[in-house]
Amino acid sequence: MRTPKVDLRRAVDRFHTELDWLDSRHSFSFGHHYDERNTHHGLLLVNNDDTVAPGTGFDTHPHRDMEIVTWVLRGSLVHQDSEGHNGVIYPGLAQRMSAGTGILHSEKNDAPDAHDQPVHFVQMWVLPDEGGLTPGYQQAEVDAELLAGGLVPVASGMARHDAAIRINSSDAALYAARLDTGGSVRLPDAPYLHLFIARGAVTLESAGELTAGDAVRLTATGGHLLTATAPAELLLWEMHTALG
């Protein structure tokens, strides 16, 4: 039996990578940042909050056996990979890349309409049900659904969800929500939840005030009411199993 827990993680306490072209905040151990007490929550291993300068980005690099979901908050991000997929990711469009047996890809802030503006996005990695899958790619617009103001299932491997995109993780689902001031949502019940405030400010029962970059890791609990105290955007992972 899991013990119910609400674990608040403040934005300022995240690992930080700062380069001349990249400002990246890591919710979990990533790259040379390592803390054995902070490697994952549920199936979520990476929650990177990245800002990339115009005309720059991540050059071609490999991934393997990971479901990678990218969510753009501002600007646009150009994706290209070794399987021939390419596209421009922008706010309101969800993108998933299944690394599978191995894939090379690049992510650049060099879209023709970038207008010399930084791109700000969150990239999240969850483990697939099994390794050695065929690499894949999917993207879909969810702007219309987000206008309704509730939790929108953006990426899911759960059979009960009609999500915009599918992931190869049958015990994981990502929701997004955009809330006006005073708007509210209730978190689902699940063994593991990871709430990330991408922008704005909210209050959450049992956690209090949260602002951009703050996260809450919930274990064996749910049903908490979240209310926006300023226009807000949030990302919520629901997970029904965890890494060993």
Image: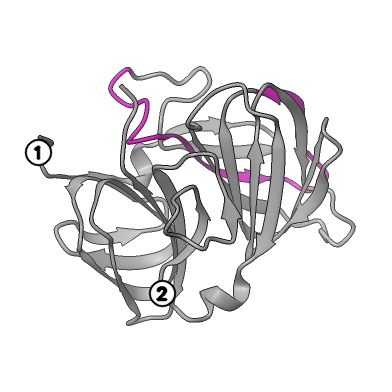
Q: Residues within 10 Å of mark 1 (few under 14, many from 20)?
A: few
* 99 or 18, nearer to the observer: 99
Q: Earlier in the sequence, mark 1 or mark 2?
A: 1
80 w.r.t. 130: above or below: below
Q: Amino acid at mark 1?
A: Thr
Res. 128 in view: yes
Q: Is residue 55 part of the magenta span, yes or no? A: yes
Q: Secondary structure at mark 2?
A: loop
Residue nearer the viewer, 86 or 122: 86
Q: Residue type at mark 2: give it.
A: Gly
| Span colored in magenta | 36-63
The part of the image, by quadrant, that contains residue 67 is: top right
- What is the x, y in percent for residue 191? 23, 44
Residue annotated with mark 1: 3
Q: Which mark is residue 117?
A: none
Q: How is the image coloured?
A: one colour
Q: Is residue 15 left or right of residue 37?
A: right
Which residue is nearer to you in this view: 81 or 34? 81
Residue 139, by quadrant, is bottom right
State which quarter of the image contains the C terminus: top left
Q: Residue furthest right?
A: 112
**Number of on-image labels:** 2
Position of the N terminus, as image quadrant, is top left
Q: Element at badge 1?
A: loop
Q: Going 31% across and 42% down the picture, which residue do you hit?
A: 240
Q: State the mark number for residue 150.
A: 2
* Residue name at image x 34 percent, y 26 percent: 243
